[in-house]
Image (spheres, helix red, strand yellow):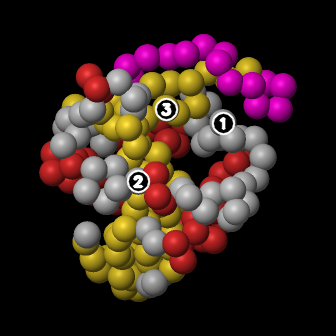
Amino acid sequence: MSALIIDDRRVNAGTRHELKIRDAVESDLPAIIKIYNAAIATRMATAQLDPVSLEERRDWLKQHSPDRHPFWVLEINRRIAGWLTLKPFLPRCAYRGTAEVSVYVDEKFRRRGVARTLLAEAISLAPSLQINAMVGLIFAHNAPSLKLFDQLGFERWGLLPRVARLDDVERDLTIVGRRV
């Protein structure tokens, strides 16, 4: 994985932070779940409606393989700031080279390049993971995520109107994709 040193110009001018992307391990699960549960509450980033527990997600990491469908965390100064997963898009063999990407960022680290850094790493390493296309499923009302994916070369590949119901509000799902 990678380690970077960045200057954080958005928070404290001249402050240096060490960023490290690495495979998630079981001891990361509490931080991963905390980030995910915060995203659930926003009704912007996941169709999951109820918070998840450590017990429910204990096997989450086992569903991923570092050499094909990784589960990465990004640390800033040894604190988990966000995470990304690549998982099989659909189970049929013809989709073997396509991965669904999901990325989540801790509320305290948003708008600091965490998701961009994770996505850029995934795009960069996709060929070595035997991935030739990446797909994201993003709620149409999640403008920040759609903007980020657009900026990183993802295109709008489809729209599923009103397929999700979040607190009695029907929401559209935008399908974005990128060949890598």
* Mark 2 / mark 3, whichever is N-terminal: 2
Residue pointed to by mark 3: 137
Residue pointed to by mark 1: 47
Q: Is 70 rendered above or below residue 75?
A: above
Residue 47: percent from left, percent from top:
66, 36
Report whether 143 appears left or right of 19: right
Q: Residue at x 49, y 32 (%)?
A: 137
Residue pointed to by mark 2: 64
Q: Is residue 165 magenta?
A: yes
Residue 54 appears in the picture as rendered: yes
Q: Quadrant of the N terminus?
A: bottom left
* Real-space CA distance between mark 2 and mark 3, rounded to the nearest whole angstrom: 18 Å
Q: In the drawing, what numbered circle is on residue 134?
A: none
Report helix, strand or loop for mark 1.
Answer: loop
Q: Is 142 rendered above or below residue 84?
A: above
Circle 1: is it few (<14), some (14-19), or many (20+) Cα within 10 Å?
A: some
Residue 14 appears in the picture as rendered: no
Q: Residue at x 44, y 68 (%)?
A: 24
What's the magenta region?
154-169
